[in-house]
Image (cartoon, rainbow, N blue to C red):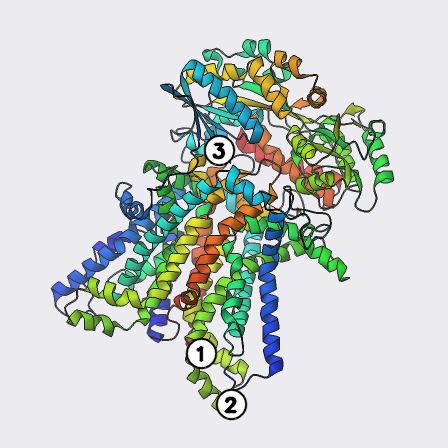
Amino acid sequence: MITARTSPLKAVLLHLALLAGTSFSLFPIYFVVQASLRPGNTLYSTELQLLPTNATLDNFRHMLLETPLPLWLWNSTKVAVATTFATLLITVTAAYALSRFRFRGRGLLLGGMLALQAFPGFLSIIAFYLILNRLGLTNTHLGLILIYSAGAIVFNVWNLKGYFDTIPVDLEEAAMIDGCTPTQAFVRVMLPLARPSLAVTALFGFLAGWNEYIFAQTLLFDESMYTAPVGIFGLQDTYSQPWGWFAASSLIVSVPVVILFLYLQRNLVAGLSAGGVKG
Amino acid sequence: MKRFTHILLAVLVAATLLLAACGQSSPAAAPTAPGAAEPTKAAEPTKAAPAAEPTKAAEPTPAPDALGSGSSEIVIWHGWQGDYYEAIKQAFADYASKNNVKITLLRVPDLNNKVQVAVPSGQGPDIIAWVNDQIGKNALSGTIQPLDSLGIDAAYLTQNFTDVASSAMVYDGKAYGVPESLEAITFIYNKKLIQTADLPTSTDDLIARAKAFNGPDKYLFVYSSKDAYFSAPWWQGAGVTLVTPDGKTELSSDKGLKAAELIKSFSTIMPKEIDYGVADTLFKEGKAAIIMNGPWAIADYQKSGLDVGLATVPVVSSSGQPGQPFVGVKLLMLAANAKNPTGAVELMKYYGSAEVQAKLAQVNKQVPANKAAQEQVKSDPIIAGFIAQAANGKPLPNTQFIDAMWDPISKTLEAIWTGASPPDQAIKDGATLFDEKAQDLK
Amino acid sequence: MAQSLTRQRPAPASAGSHNQSVRQSLTAAAYLMPALIGILVVNVLPIFYNMYMSLTNRNGPARFAEGKYRVVGFDNYIRLLSQSDFYIVLGKTLLYATLCVTLFFTVGLAFALILNHPAIRGRAIWRTLMILPWAVPTWVTALIWKFLFHGQYGPINQILRLTGLPAPDWLLNGTSAFVAITVVNLWMSYPFFMLILLGGLQSIPTDMYEAASIDGASWWRQLWSITLPLLRPVALPAVILSAIAQFQMFNTVWLMTKGGPVQRVGQPGATELLLIWAYNQGFQGAQRFGLVSAFAIVVFIILLAITALYIRVTNATKGVYE
C-alpha cells in the first residue's frame, strides 16, 4: 500500500474523500450549534436556514445562570472522574493478571466476560435498582459509579490485555532478576510502557460516566444529585422540547470530551491498536 | 501475534460454546458459580471509588427545595416547572412556616416509572403530584393509598370541588386524591390571521374553510394529529367511549369509523409529517391560524408576540355533538408508605383550598378544581376559555385500563394518517391491540 | 467464575517451584478480584434476578407488589415464543445488526486507509473532526437527526429539493426509515472503527507491503492477504461487541421513529427492532415484568449462540487462509 510517489490527482481525491467524511460527521453537529444560537426554543423552522437569524447567546446564559446546570456538570464531573479511576484500577489489574499469569479458568473468564455483554441490561433496569437498593446505593453517585465502571470492564480488559500481550515479558523478567516483585515490575515497567492503552481506558471510563442517562435517570431521584444528561433531558415537558436549551447545554457538555479527545489524540490511536501485529 | 490470536480465538470458542450450552439446557444454569452472589461482599470494589472522588468543593445551588424547618418532614415528588412551580413553592413555604413542618419538593422526571420502582422497595415520597389517569394503576399495584379514613372522602370532595374534579378522584368507590386543576385542549387562534366570526363551527365547516384558506406553507388548522390524547375530541365527539371501566373500547364501531374518516380528511389539510413540534412551530411562525393545544402553551405563544384567542372545539358533523377533549385533573396522591400520612393529608387539604388554587390559576392560567376558586378567577378571558372547554370535555378515565389505550390509538392514528391501512381496517386492528394490552391490566 | 479461580491448581506451564506457582495464582486472584466483584454485582446478579422473574406471572399492576405474583413456570417463554411477530422482529434485527457492523467496518476501514496514506496532510485535524460525533450526547443527536430527516422541513430534503433531487418522506416510508436509522447509526459508530483500524494499520510493518510489491501483488491483493488478516485481532473484539450492541439497539431508534412507521396496527413497525418490540410489548400498556424478563433471557441466549457461531466461523476461515 506504500507507493513511492502519489500522483497529485490521487492526493486531491483522497483529500476530497476526507472532506466528504468530515462533512458527514459535522453536518448534524452544525445544526446543534445553530439551534443553540437561535432565540426561542424551536428546532424546526419551515424554511431552510443555513445561518441562524438573530443569533444570540441567550440559551447559554440561561442554562449556565438560571438552571442548576453548573451543579449537574459538577455532579457529572464527580461521577465521570471517579468512574475513570475505578475503571482504571479494576481493568488494569485484571488485564495484567489475564495477560501475565497462567491459571485455570483464565480462558473461561475472558470468554465469560464477553458472553455477559450479551445480556440486555436495558430490559432489567429494575434488577439494577433492587440490587443497588439492597446495597443502600440508590440515589447516590456511588451506585452509578459502580454500574458504570463495572459496565466498562469488558471492552477495556480485552483492549488492555491485548496491549499488555505486545509488551515483551523479558522486560519484567529483567526487573525481577534485579529484585523487583511481580507487582513492582508491573507498576514500574509495564504501566509506563502501556500508557497509550491506559489513556484509552481512562477516556472510555470517563465517557461512560459522562454521557449515560438511562441508568442515571432511573437511579437518581433528587434533582441536586442529577448528572448533566439527566438534568438536561428533564427540562422537556410532556409535549415540547426546549431545543435552544437542549442544544446549548449539549454543546457545553461536549466541551470537556472534545478537550480530552484533543489531549489524548496520539494515544487514542496507538492505545486502541491492541497489539495488532507484534507478539 | 499468532499466539495471541490463537489463544484468543480458542478461548472464545470454548468459553462461549460452553456458556451457550449451559444457558440452553436449562435456564437455571448460570454462566457463573451459583452461590457466589453475596451482596455484602459486593460493597468492596466501590471503596476504591470514593477515594478518587473529589468531594470537598462546595456545591453551587442547593436543591431540592426544602421549605421550613419543622421537626416533621413531608416529601413531595412532582413534575412542576417554571413560574407555576415558583407559585406552588411559595404556597408551600407559607404553610411550612405557619405549621412548623418541613416540606421537601423533589422534581422527578419519569415520575411514572420512578414511583413504580421506588415505593415497593420502601423508598419514595409522602405525596405524589400527578394527573388522575394514574390513579387506577397505582391503586391496583399498591403504590398509593385511599384517603377515606384520613378525612378525605367523596362527600368532602363534592363539597369543595367541581363535579368533574371530585368524580375523577374516586376509584373503586374510594377517594384517592385532592384535585388541583382541570386541563383540556382547546382551539387557540391567532387573532391576526383569523377573525372570531370566521372560526369554524363544525368539522365540515373546518375542512371547507381550510381548503379555501390553505396555501403554500399556510394552514388554517394544525395539531399533533398522531397523538392519542390530541385525537380524543374527534373520537369522543363522534360518540365513541375510548375506554370503559371494565376494560373495553368502542374504537371499532360505526361511530369510530366516522371519527376515523374525519381524521383521514384532516390529513388532507395539514402537513403530512406532523407532530407536536411541527404544529407548534407553524403556529408560532404565523403559518397556521388555529392550533389545538392546552393551557401550558399559552404563555409561550404570548411570549412569541402572538395575540391569541380561545374557542371551544367545534361540533363533530357526523354526530352533531361538540368535540370532546379529555379533561385531565391534576392532583396530589398519598404514597402507600408515606411516613407522615396525617400531616400529608392536612397539607393536601391546604393545597385544595380556594386561596391557594386561585393564586395558582392566576399564574398558570389554569382552571381551578376548587369551586370557590373557580368563581374568583373566571373573569380572566383565558381561564374562561378553558372553563368553557372543560365543560364540554370528558374526564380522563382513572381506570387502569387507560394504559391499554394510548399506544393502540396512536398507532391507529398513524395508520389512518399515512394511509398504511384504510380507516375501517385501522380501527379494527387498533381495537384488537387494545384488547391484547388490556388482558394484563385486569 | 469466582469459584473456578479459588479452586484453581497451579498452572503447569509456569516455571519454578510449586510454591511459586501457588503464589502466582494467588497474586492473579488478587489482581482479578475487583473486576470479578464488579462483574458479579453488576452483570451476573441481574441475570439471576431476571431468570427468577421470567418464571413468575408478574405482569400487570394487580400482580406487581411483592407477594402478589407467583412462580408459574414457562408461561412467559411460551407466550413470547409462540408469537410469529417475534421471529419477524428477530430476523429484522439480525439484518440490521449485520448491515450496521458491515458498514461500520467498511467505512471505518476506508477512512482509516485514507488517513494512513502518506499523501494526507493535516492528519490529526481530520481525525479529530471525524470523531466529534462521539462527543455529543446520543439522545441529542438522535433527536437532531429526526429533524434533519423531516420530509417537509428537514434540512436534508430542503437541500435535496434545491438541487432538484427527489426528496422522500424518510421517516414515513418503511424502507427509507430503515435506511435513515442505519445512516444515523453509521454516523455515530464509524469513527470508533476508524480509530481502531487506524491503530491496527499503523502497527503493520511497511516492509511486508514492500515485499509484496516486489512480488507484483496488486493493491487489492495486498489488502486481502496482508492488511485484513493482520487487522483481525484488532477488529474481532470490536466487531463482536459492536454487533452485540447493535442487536440491543434501543435508544437512538426509539427517539427517531418509536419503531414506526406503522405498517399495520398490531404488527411490528418497519424499524421495530427487538428491544423496541420488547419495550412496546412489556411497557406500553401493562408493565409486564415477567414477560420482559423472559425476553431478556431469550435475547441473551440467542446472542450467546450467535457470538459463538460467529467466532467459530471466523476461526475456520482463518485456518483456510493460513
Identify residue for label 2.
C216
Q: Could you tell me residue B152's position as x and y percent? A: 50, 12
x, y percent for residue C283: 53, 38
**Crowd rating for badge 3 (residues with CA inside 10 Å; few <14, some 14–19, many 20+):** many
At 59% from the left edge and 66% from the top edge, which residue is drawn? A21
Q: Secondary structure at mark 2?
A: loop
Looking at the picture, which amino acid does disc 3 mark? Val
Q: Which residue is mark 3?
A: B108
Taking depth in this image into account, of B302 and C175 the one nearest to the observer is B302
User: Which of the 4 image quarters holds residue C219?
Assistant: bottom right
Q: Secondary structure at mark 1?
A: helix
Relative vertical location of residue C258 with respect to residue B182 in this rendering, above or below = below
In the drawing, does residue B199 fall left or right of residue B51?
right
Number of other residues with Cα within 10 Å of mark 2, as a class: few under 14, some 14 to 19, many 20 or more: few
Question: Is residue A223 something that shows in the picture?
Answer: yes
Residue type at mark 2?
Answer: Gly
User: What's the chain of the residue with tag 3?
Assistant: B
Q: Residue under mark 1: which chain is it in? A: C
Task: Give yes or no for contact between labels 3 and 2 (Cβ–Cβ under 8 Å).
Answer: no
Judge depth for marks 1 and 3 and give the one in front: 3
Left or right relative to A215: residue C121: right
Q: Name the chain under label 2.
A: C
Could you give the CA–CA distance between mark 1 and mark 3, rounded to whole angstroms?
57 Å
**Which numbered mark, 1 or 2, is in the foreground of this view?**
2
Residue B424 position in % (x across, y down): 74, 38
| Residue named by callout 1 | C321
Whether tag 1 and tag 2 are in contact, CB under 8 A, the answer is no
Q: Amino acid at mark 1?
A: Tyr
- State the CA–CA distance, disc 1 to disc 2: 20 Å
